[in-house]
Amino acid sequence: MSLKLRTIIGNLPGVGRYLYPYKNNYSIFKDDSQFYSKGFTKPLSKFSRAKIIVVGLPKSGNVWLQNLIAESLDMDKINIKDKGKRGVAMTHTPFNRSYLYRKDFARGVYLMRDIRDMVVSYYHYSKTEEYHRPYTDPFCHYEHIDDFYFEYFLNIIVPRYDWFNHAQTFINKGLPVVKYERLWDDPEKELNLMFRKLGLSVDQEKIAAAIRENELKKLAKSGKEADVSIPKSHFRKGGYGNYKETLSEKVLADINIRFRDYILAFGYELDH
């Protein structure tokens, strides 16, 4: 369809804007010609039902970061589908154009984690009672992590989340990166840097209190109440580099080949 015809249809009353909606002027996703989004210049108070979204692949620590941000800012933890609520939401969903038109998205961050640690974490998650409920996958049963990786992770999880494009798309659109490993090593420093990137001024005592209340060891014992209750099985011991003791040479060799560009693109190192 030519630009001219698209413009004509787009300007039709009612139906035109439904088929070709305008990008939100204060979208948190920038255009290619911009360094940053206009949305980051607008105070949270100016957004109707303002939301901060945490975007990341599964088992990246998304719930942990969601809690840290929400409690640092005295905001509720909410479901991203609840357009009528103000709060901090998270999503694993790959980028799609509908994100551009959400006027309630006031800020956003992308949470990055080493894929090898995510494989291990996802394997343990897949063996919990929570994962075997109908809303996830009651038929996922693997006794060995090698089988899980080659039969399930590569063929079900990677395509489901458009793994190879997931991070790059959101980051190219302007979401600042929070690295799980930096957050684990020095949560106060990483949160302060993140809030600066988001153009938000945050009380240091609030950040410190949020960190204390969301230690992963504590969450693994008690779970966490949010918009929906998050069971303790969702949390593990945290940390990083644990994959070296868990993944076989066969799996590591495959990851080195299959995910080589992905690993190097985000500052991680290949295993030798």
Image (tube, rainbow, N blue to C red):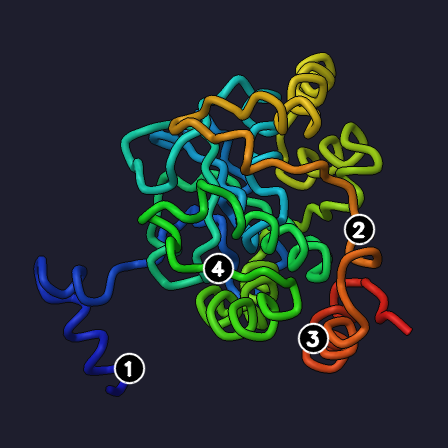
Between disc 2 and disc 3, the foreground one is 2
Callout 4 environment at 10 Å: few (<14), some (14 to 19), or many (20+)? some
- 136 lies left or right of 220: left
In this rendering, is residue 36 above or below 208? below
Q: What element carries label 1?
A: helix
Callout 2 environment at 10 Å: few (<14), some (14 to 19), or many (20+)? few
- Whole-percent x and y of residue 246? 77, 57
The reply to whether residue 65 is visible in this rendering is no
Q: The disc labelled 4 sits on which kind of residue? A: His
Q: The disc labelled 1 sits on which kind of residue? A: Leu
The alpha-carbon separation of the residues under discs 1 and 2 comes to: 52 Å
Q: Mark 2–mark 3 contact, CB under 8 Å?
A: no
User: Residue, x 70% and y 27% (percent of image)?
Assistant: 217
Q: Which of 245 and 26 is in front in this view?
A: 245
Q: The disc labelled 3 sits on which kind of residue? A: Phe
| Residue at image mark 1 | 3
| Residue at image mark 2 | 242
Q: Along the polypeptide, which appears first: circle 1 or circle 4?
A: 1
The alpha-carbon separation of the residues under discs 2 and 3 comes to: 18 Å
| Residue at image mark 4 | 141
In this rendering, is residue 58 above or below 227? below
Q: Along the polypeptide, which appears first: circle 3 or circle 4?
A: 4
| Residue at image mark 3 | 259
Q: What element carries label 2?
A: helix
Between disc 1 and disc 4, the foreground one is 4
Between disc 1 and disc 2, the foreground one is 2
Classify the position of the N terminus by image quarter.
bottom left
Q: What element carries label 3?
A: loop
Q: Along the polypeptide, which appears first: circle 4 or circle 2?
A: 4
| Mark seen at residue 243 | none
Between disc 3 and disc 1, the foreground one is 3
